[in-house]
Image (cartoon, helix red, strand yellow):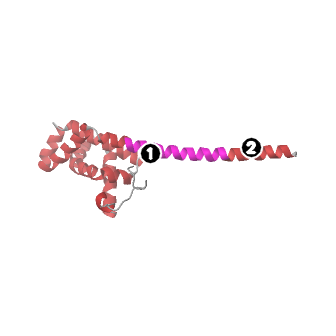
Amino acid sequence: MPLALVIVQYVSAVALAVGVLVGVVQLRQHSVRRRREAMLELLHSFQTPDMTSALTLVIRRSRELSPHDFREFVRGEARGPMSHVCVNFQAIGASVYAGELDLDLVRAVFGEAITRAWAALRATIEDTRQQQGWPRLYEWFQWLAERIEERETSAPREPAYVAFKNWKSPAGGRAG
């Protein structure tokens, strides 16, 4: 076999290996970017006045009303806000399950809001499932709240202001 042909085959093999390596790196970068974008989208979904007021209303009223009165409230005047909360948490739960969002990050940012909302709405959702024969109604919201509760039971989180009080910016003290 002529030397030139051996060199061409060698260069081709190296080029192919480098191309595969570059492709793998780009896929990993794409995956990281996709997860970051999903987390940013999650943050945006919670930064709307509608979501904030709906979540506040549901949690606050669940503390103020008897369980029966709260169910009536949620089925009546709060049906829209309740649905808004449930649909958002349903989407987050499905996204965590699919690996698009990190459970620990969701837990750190929204965990208590999710578990409190589930605690407030659980009986109403379970009643609706039974009455309408719809066992999967807000299934991912329930799944997510249960996963967060499990993590809190097995490894409770300290508040960030306690756990990271000595934190230093990786940017060497510059605002980042």
The residue drawn where x is 21% and y is 49% is 120
The residue drawn where x is 32% and y is 40% is 45
Residue 44 is left or right of residue 33, and the answer is left
Which residue position is annotated with label 1?
A: 35
Magenta residues, dominant SS class:
helix
Can residue 112 be seen here? yes
Residue 102 is left or right of residue 15, and the answer is left
Q: Secondary structure at mark 2?
A: helix
Which residue position is annotated with label 2?
A: 12
Q: Position of residue 130 (x, y in %)?
A: 25, 44
Q: Position of residue 90 (x, y in %)?
A: 33, 43
Q: Is residue 42 magenta?
A: no
Q: Is residue 33 magenta?
A: yes
Q: Amino acid at mark 1?
A: Arg
Can residue 134 be seen here? no
Q: Quadrant of residue 46?
A: top left
- List the single residue furthest toward the right: 2
The residue drawn where x is 77% and y is 47% is 10
- Could you tell me how far apart the alpha carbons at marks 2 and 1 are, in whole angstroms? 35 Å
Q: Amino acid at mark 2?
A: Ser
Q: Quadrant of residue 135?
A: top left
Q: Which residues are magenta?
A: 18-40
Residue closer to the observer: 12 or 154 = 12
Instruction: Of the two numbered discs 2 and 1 on the same chain, state the one appearing first in sequence.
Output: 2
Q: Secondary structure at mark 1?
A: helix
Q: Position of residue 40 (x, y in %)?
A: 38, 42
* 162, above or below 124, in the image: below
